Image: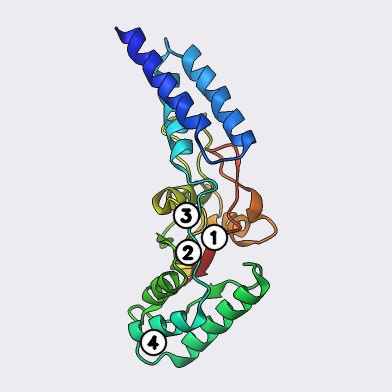
Amino acid sequence: ELGDDFDAETDQLEEKINNLNADDSVKEKLLKELSRYKSAMGNPAEGNIIRTYLETMLDLPWNNETEENPNLQNAEEILNRDHYQLTKVKERILEYLAVKQYTKSLKGPILCLVGPPGVGKSSIAKSVAKSLNKKFVRISLGGVRDEAEIRGHRRTYIGAMPGRLVYALKEAKVSNPLILLDEIDKLSSDYKGNPADALLEVLDQNQNKAFRDAFMEVEIDLSNVLFITT
């Protein structure tokens, strides 16, 4: 009875992998891990790690995207409706969106909203996401001092988990959301490494096409994500 159940589960996983909207290299990696999962049937500890890995990989959006709304007038209306005054901030955001639409690329500066708590930094980012028809995900970086929070843990460790960026993509369910990196100045570092340095790979347009999370072991394309920091 146990054997039949296991076979049904592996068949289901294989079907999900084959139907995944991802590159062939990712599918190849997953099928390899699935064959390892089948052979680890007698070892529950290793089997659980591989199963968690497979489920996390299958939950990622890979090539699923939302269609963006390029209408700047709509963006201006939404910003004016949601926020009173803040004229300079709204002008700068519209300027940024106009350049983005013109170049058809996300390359260029990353917006950083600066101000005391409660002035509407996070809600402005939410309005930008609404105006562009993008999914909005917020990552709070206050007090984060472990590099693995950004890059994930290697799977050799017990209780290994992917980093916050992977969780943000899982939550968004699309590969082109707007991710708000909140309180980026509150990052700290300790003997486990400096998370601010790990963020360079996330935010640098020349590197984030192939962001490598230590847990996932495959390259993740973050170049379609619109980052706003506060």
First-in-chain label (2 vs 1): 2
User: In the image, what residue type sits under mark 2?
Assistant: Leu
Q: Which residue is mark 4?
A: 80
Between label 3 and label 1, give the one nearer the viewer. Answer: 1
Residue 157 visible here: no
Q: Which residue is mark 2?
A: 178
Between label 4 and label 3, give the one nearer the viewer. Answer: 4
Residues at badges 2 and 1 in contact (C-beta under 8 Å)? yes
Q: Is residue 157 left or right of residue 205?
A: left
First-in-chain label (4 vs 1): 4
How far apart marks 4 and 2 lie (CA) works out to 19 Å
Q: Is residue 128 above or below residue 30?
A: below
Helix, strand or loop status at disc 4:
helix
The picture quadrant where one finds residue 42 is top left
How far apart marks 2 and 1 lie (CA) works out to 6 Å
User: In the image, what residue type sits under mark 4?
Assistant: Asn
Q: Which residue is mark 1?
A: 225
Residue at image point 47% right, 49% down:
149
User: In the image, what residue type sits under mark 1?
Assistant: Val
Helix, strand or loop status at disc 1:
loop
Mark 2 closeness class: few <14, some 14–19, many ≥20 residues within 10 Å = many
- Nearer to me, 52 or 73: 73
Q: Is residue 37 above or below residue 186?
A: above
Residue at image point 60% right, 61% down:
203
First-in-chain label (3 vs 1): 3
